Image: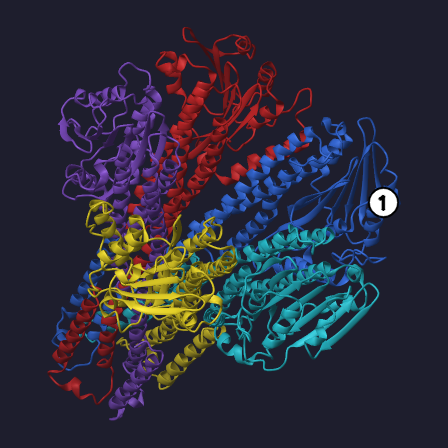
Chain colours: A cyan, B blue, C red, D purple, E yellow
Amino acid sequence: MSGSWSIKDKARSLGLMKNEDAGSDVMELAAPPLPLAGDRFPEKPKVTIIDYSDQSYHEAEAKEVAECFHFKDQPTVTWINIDGLHQMDFLEKLGSCYGIHPLVLEDILTDQRPKIEDYDDYIFIVLKMLYYEDKEEDKTEEEDGDDLGESSLDMDQVSIILGPNFIISFKEKEVDVFNPLRDRLRTAKGKIRRQGADYLAYSMIDAIVDNYFLIMEKLGDRFEDLEDVVVSDPQPGVLPTIYNLKRDMLFLRKSVWPLREAISKMQRTDSHLVSEATKIYLRDVYDHTIQVIENVETFRDMSASLLETYLSSLSNKLNEVIKLLTIISTIFIPLTFLAGVYGMNFRFMPELEAPWGYPAILIFMLMVVVVMLAYFRRKEWI
Amino acid sequence: MSGSWSIKDKARSLGLMKNEDAGSDVMELAAPPLPLAGDRFPEKPKVTIIDYSDQSYHEAEAKEVAECFHFKDQPTVTWINIDGLHQMDFLEKLGSCYGIHPLVLEDILTDQRPKIEDYDDYIFIVLKMLYYEDKEEDKTEEEDGDDLGESSLDMDQVSIILGPNFIISFKEKEVDVFNPLRDRLRTAKGKIRRQGADYLAYSMIDAIVDNYFLIMEKLGDRFEDLEDVVVSDPQPGVLPTIYNLKRDMLFLRKSVWPLREAISKMQRTDSHLVSEATKIYLRDVYDHTIQVIENVETFRDMSASLLETYLSSLSNKLNEVIKLLTIISTIFIPLTFLAGVYGMNFRFMPELEAPWGYPAILIFMLMVVVVMLAYFRRKEWI
Amino acid sequence: MSGSWSIKDKARSLGLMKNEDAGSDVMELAAPPLPLAGDRFPEKPKVTIIDYSDQSYHEAEAKEVAECFHFKDQPTVTWINIDGLHQMDFLEKLGSCYGIHPLVLEDILTDQRPKIEDYDDYIFIVLKMLYYEDKEEDKTEEEDGDDLGESSLDMDQVSIILGPNFIISFKEKEVDVFNPLRDRLRTAKGKIRRQGADYLAYSMIDAIVDNYFLIMEKLGDRFEDLEDVVVSDPQPGVLPTIYNLKRDMLFLRKSVWPLREAISKMQRTDSHLVSEATKIYLRDVYDHTIQVIENVETFRDMSASLLETYLSSLSNKLNEVIKLLTIISTIFIPLTFLAGVYGMNFRFMPELEAPWGYPAILIFMLMVVVVMLAYFRRKEWI
Amino acid sequence: MSGSWSIKDKARSLGLMKNEDAGSDVMELAAPPLPLAGDRFPEKPKVTIIDYSDQSYHEAEAKEVAECFHFKDQPTVTWINIDGLHQMDFLEKLGSCYGIHPLVLEDILTDQRPKIEDYDDYIFIVLKMLYYEDKEEDKTEEEDGDDLGESSLDMDQVSIILGPNFIISFKEKEVDVFNPLRDRLRTAKGKIRRQGADYLAYSMIDAIVDNYFLIMEKLGDRFEDLEDVVVSDPQPGVLPTIYNLKRDMLFLRKSVWPLREAISKMQRTDSHLVSEATKIYLRDVYDHTIQVIENVETFRDMSASLLETYLSSLSNKLNEVIKLLTIISTIFIPLTFLAGVYGMNFRFMPELEAPWGYPAILIFMLMVVVVMLAYFRRKEWI
Amino acid sequence: MSGSWSIKDKARSLGLMKNEDAGSDVMELAAPPLPLAGDRFPEKPKVTIIDYSDQSYHEAEAKEVAECFHFKDQPTVTWINIDGLHQMDFLEKLGSCYGIHPLVLEDILTDQRPKIEDYDDYIFIVLKMLYYEDKEEDKTEEEDGDDLGESSLDMDQVSIILGPNFIISFKEKEVDVFNPLRDRLRTAKGKIRRQGADYLAYSMIDAIVDNYFLIMEKLGDRFEDLEDVVVSDPQPGVLPTIYNLKRDMLFLRKSVWPLREAISKMQRTDSHLVSEATKIYLRDVYDHTIQVIENVETFRDMSASLLETYLSSLSNKLNEVIKLLTIISTIFIPLTFLAGVYGMNFRFMPELEAPWGYPAILIFMLMVVVVMLAYFRRKEWI
């Protein structure tokens, strides 16, 4: 979930989590040892509470879990955002206050496919947020990723719990696509403050899907650069970059495909938590998701083409090199032979004695060169 | 939306638009800053109004928005065509007069998949018009497209609003596939003047789909040319052309596939805006769309073959070059060795003293050449 | 529709037709300028009328359209076959007599996917007839097809109008798969004369589908030949042949796939024009169509394999050539060096003075050759 | 249907049969000239009759058709097996006695996809039996198959007519997977004698499907062998073998896929001819069919990999050869040049006069060699 | 089922089993010779009985079949686990005691696709357990697997019979993913002891699916290693490893895909044996299965990329080698020719007499070298 984009880490995090889970039966223990997503962040999670209505707006950073509790029964819409998933008791307290099922808590902490599940009292939404990694921050992970190229696509799982008048969102990293959303809430811009929690949820999903377009723009840039290089100057160094791009594409695809189904499900839900007005907006997000999927598929097709084109480009280059070798060899090897012949030490070689011998052989050699060059010219090699 | 066909620009325009959109919440502001499609065209949009019935025909170019308004309540069919999407207030005024939903206006200004949406009072249709770019016009964009080949496929989004007695169409560029349609309206040719707005909408869709056949004809020409070159003379310069063709195919495909679904939806709609008589004609367009899709798929399969064939063709050529090198080397390297042997300065080399030495070695060399040539002839290399 | 199999011509005919169509609105004009399929055949269309019942049989070639009219109201089954689609007024008169919709007439004249449409009074069937072109006849078209190989697959569109007691069939070319059918009608062989027009329609479809098996047999022959050549002797000239075969396969596929759907539709139709007894026979044709499709798909898979195999075969050949070059070079380059050493003119080279010098170096050279040959033998290169 | 596995023969037999069929209208003639499957077997077909009940068992070889007739109305289960399909009148008499539709007889004689058809009074089942050809028997057919490799997969069509108390099975060849079944009937082993004709039909289908596993085992063996060779020693001779394997896979696939559908249909049939008890066993066969299909698909994927791997393996080998050539050339070409320099006949070349000249140049040459070897060693070429 | 992962063994075991089965009709004989899975384990099967309720816990290893019988009618949940499938009478006695259908017993002993079948009284579940083989144990099988690489993925079929209050599980090997499960039962950890047999079945399925994540982690490790090697240093030895990885992926896929369907079926079953509470947990397992499938597909796509990348990497390397050869040849061949010219023995070669001859030619040679190097530098070859 966190960290680098490499398959290895991915699989490991998955594997380990699932394994511990299998052995721990977390849902029942008094103090459940929830699977630990990562011990690399020993600090407390950052909890931001935004409480608003059409008229009021309140924003605070919570130090204690208890600070979140009293918002539950207020008519205003409350958005509790938690960055960092490493304090288990925090989550559990929050979960028990807001009546969240242990299975949901477990899902928040483990890697999930994008999905939307309806638990009557609340809707549980899992999304994947993609972003280009800030190279300065994650020095440690770059090491094993960098030798293969420049893959900098990273992913964070965003879990959203949509209740009647609250939203609780969970992320691991602070990198945030929700900032513009917060600004709109703060400045009372747009109708967002007048709408309910479901509209806020829609806005969050929309922000994440819109972010995919940005990612695709960056992938598109990398594509353009690669295309130029592949066709004009197929350096060996391009190979890992192409390979990496294909890998990124596959993972982008894995994040986006299930999203379509999930949003479609949310759009058709019977839940009272999603108003009809919001469903219209969800249709819009759904359209965007389809557009993202189509673009991803197009990228995928083109990245396949790119590798084949690279191979052809290499062949072209090889042909050029071999042609040069052949031209040089074909011209000079016969000449060298000729020189060799008149370097022989036979006693009776009449040409050697003739005064015209040397100029004659030089002229003959020149003629050979001219004929060869004419031949190559006709073949359009030179 | 406008401009070059490159992925990069595509993604950027998308990305930026979506982004601004996410931050602006346009649907509510008093003076909504509608996402700007491009500042490159600071001139006013060109608005053409055609108002006709079976008997009457009126055509004018509107300077002010207000000129469009009074047609709304007339029984005659009105076709308002807007080229250039860069004057926001114009669109808004028009939108509020004709009761067009802000979401529709937003869709007109952003890149959409081909689709048909039914808004009770009107039907909103989005189509992609493809055309080969006029090289003289778009100098600036050619620059980053030209280094990779000769892709000149361009796209414009055509949005059509079909009301009970009016059509409003939006395009960015003036390049126009609707001219024959206008001629038919002007000259009262065909039944088009006797039919309602839905028949006009059908005629517009038909004109766009028919245009795809023209595009495919041009792609077919490029294919034919490429096939000849690829098989007979696989120049390196062909590679970007093939790659470009594949890319064009992918984008053509992306424009055409959703169209099928959209037309099928319009054909099966319950809306009172589309008469049964028109639906029969839509079935015809639907058949054409299927035909376009099948052709695109065939082109796609063949462009894949083309790249593989190119690679094989390169291998063929390499084999030829290597064969030449091998023939030359195999003939002259042994000869050079022989000459080298008799160029050695050993004191006791009886052959060197013999008068038959030189002619003998020359004859021997000739025999070597003959044997080698016979060998290559038998191998069918020469 | 007519002429060569090349994409270019295909697209052009389509494009032009569609284009003219868009501008002409043919369905309404008093004298509709029906899209012209080709001006290459200025002669009159050949119209054959076969009128039969269980007892009677009448066959004639019509000079005038009017000759066809009086058959309409007779109880006997009438089969009007028109070869050549270039006399517009002829078609129109026929159409108006038999009550055929202008859209159907237009479809007859333009390229259509195989389809079956039910127009209450009659059923309109479009099929593709494939055949191997007679090289002697179509000199003009061979020119642009021949440079790429030997593609000789050609296609003609057969349109069949099945009425209660008549069949009207339209083709462009006289090449005819219906001759055996006519023979059976003439000789009163089989139950065909006792059955209605729907059975005749079935027999025509069956004849066309059976013809596909013949086409596939010929493609299979070309495959067999290619396989041998590709594996044993990968000449460059094979490449266009493979490419052509793949292209033929794609077009064959495009003709056959929609057929399946069409026949299935006809089999399940509610129309009174198709009797239950005939539907049973249609099931048989449907099974054959599936079989054709499966064979086409198998061919397609194998033609993909063929290109890959060709590439591998080329690599094999390249390896052989390079091996020869390496063997020759590896043996003679060191020897030449040795000869060069003793060709040096140093004053103090004791070996040169020794009487055993020359034989010694010769023996040493021989040893080098033997060692090298042994090395290559062990590597199984020679 | 019979004979070799090559596409050509396949298509030809199909094509010819269908063609004759189209011209002959077999279903009506008094003495219908049923399409002839092959004139290679002029002997009479071998007809075996097994009649059994729980208590009785009777086995005989029939000389005349009439011998089969009296079993029809007996309560015991009768299995009539016909090997060889070349005596038309035999089949017709049998067909008219047991009330078999002429279409079914035609299907028995022509190549069909595996299918199951319900004709109320009986169920008609077509299956493909695959086996490895006995090389000793079919000398004539090996000739055109052998040049491309060792494909020895052969196919026979087994048609089964399941009536209330009888089974009639048709095959062309005597090679028989039904022998174990006969043994079980003879020895009264298992419950097979106590069950009806439908259980016997199930047992026959099961025997054929089980046989597919044996075929796949043999294909698996060929795979294993190929894998070793392809990776370790990519001889050119491997190429046709791989290609053949792919072709076999495609045909195996074509035989197996429709089987699934057919068995599923038989399992869900309403016919009184198949008891519920037998349907449970058919579910088992269905599961096996799915397993066969999955294995075939896996083989197909792997045979695709195999060709790509072969190509890579060839590239590897080429690299090795080229490396050797480069090492030899890079070492000796500079040395030869050096020797050449001191072979020049300039009058004033001070080195030539020096007594240390010769040893110095030899030492220098040695140094060049050492440096070169070190360079290649560092590059891990040697 | 047991043993190595190679196709050959796989197919053989399948083939042989099926064959014997076909001939033996096992379901009826008094002493049924159940198909023998393998004679390599002549020891008795290891039978572990765990009997538990919320309060009690009993664990024992059974020596005799009879020990298992009395648990049948007790209200406690009984889990009978059998490792080793080679004692036929044992299984039969157990089967007859617990009322298990002979077909189920046969399925336990033969290779099956993962599936779930409802037999009213019990549910029969077949799963595939994958694990990395312990190299120390299976010496014999390594031999034929090792020459192609390092494939160490192994598979065991786990059959589970879920009755109202008992679970009987069958495996061939003792390697066990159920150990954590046993620990949880022993220590009364989690709610597992309070739940019924269906929850135990869920826990077992969950343990197996979770194990797939571990397998994928290890495959991911192998991928990472391969990626580095393929791109940076394409050794020939990598080829079998890639090929093996692809093969492993295909088999992993074959194990996982049917699982999805099976779990989905169990989740939607009407059987009273699966409680609604357990079905919710099955939904969780289903989600995990989907995730596994998506990962497998991603791996598959990437392994295809890997082979193509390898081929490109080889081409890169070849280009490098050829470049070196060309540089050396292009520099020295002309120089050698020059030296050859002045090694000719013509009597009248004025340069040879000149005192500046030797230095002049040396300087000229140097110039040639410099020009060549500059040329290669400009081409960025060196």
Asked if residue D367 shows in the view, the reply is yes
Q: Residue furthest top?
A: C55
Would residue D149 appear left or right of E281 to someone viewing this image?
Answer: left
Mark 1 surroundings within 10 Å by alpha-carbon count, few (fewer than 14), some (14 through 19), many (20 or more): some
Report helix, strand or loop for mark 1: helix
C37 w.r.t. E59: above or below: above
B105 w.r.t. A220: above or below: above
Tell me the residue at 59%/19% (across/down).
C100
Asked if residue A344 shows in the view, the reply is no
Tell me the residue at 23%/56% (across/down).
E88
**C267 or E59: nearer the viewer:** E59
Q: Position of residue A362 (x, y in %)?
A: 34, 69
Q: Position of residue E115 (x, y in %)?
A: 39, 52
Q: Position of residue D177 (x, y in %)?
A: 21, 41
Q: Which residue is mark 1?
A: B97
Would residue B188 appear left or right of B232 to someone viewing this image?
Answer: right
Q: Quadrant of residue C153?
A: top left
